[in-house]
Image: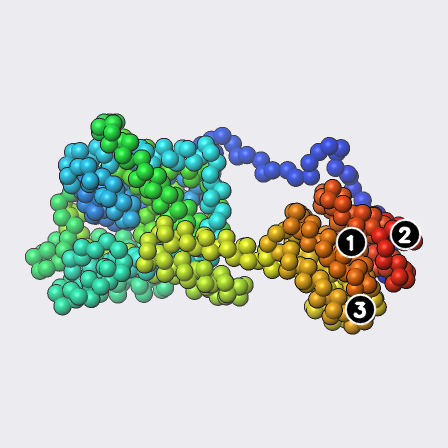
Amino acid sequence: MSDRDVARDAPEPAGEAYPGGSSPFEPVPERPLVERALPVSRQLPGYRMGSARRDLLAGVTVAALGVPAGMAYAEVAGLSPVQGLYALLLPTLAYALLGSSRHLVVGPEGSISALVAVSVLPFAAAGSAGAASLAAMLALLVGACYVIALVLRLGWLSDYFSRPVLVGYMHGVVVVLIIGQLGKLFGISISATDPIPQLVEVVKEIGDASVTTIAVSAVALAVLLPLRFIAPRFPAALVVVVGGIGLSALLNLDQHGVAVVGHIPRGLPGIRFPTPPVKQVFDLVPAALGLFLVSFAVEILTARSFAQRHGDRIGVDQELRAMAVASASAGVSQAFPIGASGSRTAVNESTGARTQLAALIATLTVAGILLFLTGPIAQLPKAVLGAVIVSAALGLLDIPAWRDLAATDRVEVAIAAITCIGVIVTGVLEAVAFAVGLTILDAVRRSARPGDAVLGFDAVLGRFADVAKHPGARVVPGVVVYRLDDRLFFANARYVSRRMREAVRGAPTTTHWLVLDAEGINHIDTTGLEALGQLVDELRTDGVALVIARMRSEVKDHLDDAGLTEQIGAHRFYPTVGAAVQACAASPPSQHSPTTQSGAQPA
């Protein structure tokens, strides 16, 4: 039975036709303006008390961790510690209101802080008012980069962050987070900022580790890690933080070699526009572009990684908008450039945050701490802070994701592994850029070796099928049917020509007709046209005629313009594979001239 017979015997479909001139594709309707402007409003209908409790616990825990971390990152940036606290307020609030991720927390971040130091300190002394003004202006410039990217619709760049890149990035972050906390866990002062130098420094200084600090770390981890598996909903991180503060004050741990957070300045920041010298502002533009690229890559990767764990979707344009406002708010509130915090996001998610309200609560908690609770937080052992981050990082491990990649394609495993190692060794931007490059090369490789098949008619399926997958499929003597599942262009033209000749040579009988099932060819370029024309001549020399079935009209137009339709023979184009095979079987092998008419109806 041919394709035409199958189509003739099929029942006529019932229902309505598409209205004339209308598109069969309807875009997803836009959300209401309020939901688009403030994505957090989507979570409010149906918000339950259980979610509120989890958001409250997550927000308070994130704030307790964010205060000492923010101070430390400000020092890394060469700024006053109080600027790190300011970066936990308006920027976090702005993203919580505008961002599309339910779990992402933005604020001071390690790699961003290091880049700020490199950008600002050549122009001003560390900790000076000049450095503070330049850092705030740098945040405004980064915000401007986000706005430009939004206007120019550059969000498509994030589409190159494939799943292997996401998997590799997240596991690289796990290693970076754990290595970054080793100094706190062992009570060692670490000056390095990159993971490998940090690890080397820890190994060299391990002899100077504080036994008391190690004991505090061990107790904290002994509580956190089992509870992660035994009672994942229990707010273990918050309990450990509060307990650590209480024990530290009770036992005077700071007098026994245990490092604590220390003095925290009290009060909230004022709002003012930074006014550094104009020449220095222009000098900061290249640095702002680099910071934008790093922060955008990290932010999108982190947001998507956590979103995939919960079946959420991330709107790239919304993220650009949210980060633009967050960066600008950092600039006018005496802070510095911010980014996505992998550690606090991990703690936020692992503590059970349900909505962006957790980040809002974190912001209010930081404000409350700055106004009323700077004393108690100063007693928090840094070892406890490190233990909470390590516990959260271990929760990000996703071994099944690697198995899924391996089951699909080992090349994807290699891309993920390279990304992971690159994040650890070279840094986020370099690793992600290299991994994206590998992803593009892999796409080119796949295009250069597209999917194809030799078809035979399977009586069970009632259609033509791949003979390699359906051994019961039968071929008509003298006729080979070849299907290409991709466009025909410069990268694969030679390969496809070779595969078609190999299909002729591999046929069980002497071949006189080669039927090209062209339904999968959605484009053909000049190289593809040239290769197809050469193939027609070579096949004719060998006594084989090319016949084409199911070719798209737009691709057929290219053949017409190039003269290939005349070279092949206009009568050798058919609407179905079955019609083409019937026509070939009914024609004697001698009828290979393009001017010879076949008795079958053309397309």
Q: Position of residue 472 (x, y in %)?
A: 77, 71
Residue type indicated by callout 2: Gln
Marks 2/3: CA distance?
A: 27 Å
Can residue 43 be seen here? The reply is: no
Q: Please name the residue shown 12% across and 65% down the image.
A: 208
Res 548 label: 1
Sequence-first tag of 1 and 3: 3
516 vs 272: above or below? below
Relative depth, front residue between 71 and 593: 593
Question: For the residue marked with disc 1, what is the amino acid?
Answer: Ile
Residue that numbered label 3 is attached to: 474
Image location of residue 112, percent across then percent down:
29, 45
* Picture quarter with the N terminus: bottom right
Say what secondary structure mark 1 lies in. Answer: strand
**Residue position for label 2:** 597
Q: Mark 2 or mark 1, which has the lower sequence index? A: 1
**Residue sitting at x 47%, y 63%:** 413
Compute the Cα span from label 2 to label 1. Answer: 15 Å
Residue 454 as seen in the image, left or right of residue 230: right
The amino acid type of the residue labelled 3 equals Arg
